[in-house]
Amino acid sequence: MRRRELLKSVLAGAALSAVGPLRGVAQAAGETVAWLTWENLAKDDYLAALVEKTGIKIEKSFIGSDDEQFAKLRAGGASSVDLITPGLDKVEFYVASNLLQPLDLAKIPNAAKLYDTFKTTKLGKKDGKTYGIPFYWGINPIVYRADLMDAEPDWSVFFEGEKYKGKLAMRDYALEGIMIAAMYLGIPKDKMFDLGDKELAEVKKALIAQKKLLRTYWTSIGDLTNLYASGEVVCAFSWVPPYYDLTARGLKMGMAKPKAGVIGWCDTIAIPAGVTGAKLDATLKVVDYLLGPDYGKKLAFGGPYAQSTSATRDALPVDQQEKIFIKDLSVMDSFVWKANPPRYTEWVALWNEVKAS
């Protein structure tokens, strides 16, 4: 009898351990998770596997900027949102306003697959807790018309490229504009976001000289793409999409990653402070899915963008790995990740003075 009772006990324990995970899925099924994010991240086919496997429904709403997202949450919108997508460098503002809750990484198995760069970053964290987990990332390079330029450019083209005067473009964004000027001037990465009066004066002088060479400060990537296509702009600090878009149209495009540094960007996934109970469990399952292989493959081809985890890396063709910069991860060694300058109000004022000069 003792052996029989022991066997019953063991079988009962095994049954409970098997039912445990299934119960979690059952509890998540039928839950609706409201995700406030960029439109290009929440396509139905990207999320189809999640919905099919878990029964979780995704209610999507879209943002036009990180500032818009932050303002919405501060105005009370957090009560109607379960998941958001803040920039890695912006998470600290949400945390300071008590808008986010720390993430339980034990409930996000795919977080263990984060690339080392994202595991060790101090951004998105406070007091040893993670509030924004790196989600997807990329670079903002120099994109140029290879058929209309003599050689691959570096940052100096935007300050010394007299030959291309009137055919150069910069993004209208103080943070990146000043970062580029700092790289051009040789200011070290570890000092780039804490510029003193002397360095800011040098940056301003360089940016005023730069303005004389520019065709425009762009705000819409669609407008910039059209300027490339018409030949009105031959070289610009850009996002990646115009390179692939125009190459597909048959134009000979180039993408430069200057040795002085490349601006890297990363967005995170974060959960507002008020999400609890079954809703929180469902939201954590969504987070884990977004870091996993099914979503990663869709993003790699549809973006094309790279996840912050290696979940799908080895399953991708080599050419696609190269396309999203994960074939050789040493590319990250040259990245300058965006951070929040203590004197950013002065940076914005400087930028506006340059544009008005």
Image (cartoon, rainbow, N blue to C red):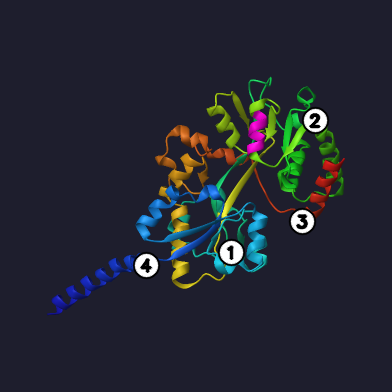
- Considering only order in the chain, which callout, 2 or 1, is on the residue closer to the N terminus? 1
Q: Is residue 26 magenta?
A: no
Q: Is residue 90 visible?
A: no
Which marked residue is nearer to the observer: mark 1 or mark 3?
3
User: How far apart are labels 1 and 4 at the CA level?
Assistant: 27 Å
- Considering only order in the chain, which callout, 4 or 1, is on the residue closer to the N terminus? 4
Which marked residue is nearer to the observer: mark 4 or mark 3?
4
Secondary structure beneath label 1: loop
User: How far apart are labels 3 and 2 at the CA level?
Assistant: 30 Å
Residue type at tag 3? Pro
For disc 4, the marked residue is 24
- In the picture, measured across the screen, residue 102 lies left or right of residue 145, that is left
- Considering only order in the chain, which callout, 3 or 1, is on the residue closer to the N terminus? 1
The vertical placement of 108 against 46, above or below, is: below
Which marked residue is nearer to the observer: mark 3 or mark 2?
2
For disc 3, the marked residue is 342
- Considering only order in the chain, which callout, 2 or 3, is on the residue closer to the N terminus? 2
* Residue range (magenta): 222-228
Identify the residue shown where x is 63% and y is 51%: 64
Secondary structure beneath label 3: loop
Identify the residue shown where x is 41% and y is 48%: 294
Residue 72 locus on image (x, y percent) = 64, 62
Residue 67 locus on image (x, y percent) = 67, 56
Residue type at tag 4? Gly
Which marked residue is nearer to the observer: mark 1 or mark 4?
4
The vertical placement of 190 against 317, above or below, is: below
Checking the image for residue 128, the label placed there is 1
Identify the residue shown where x is 69% and y is 27%: 234
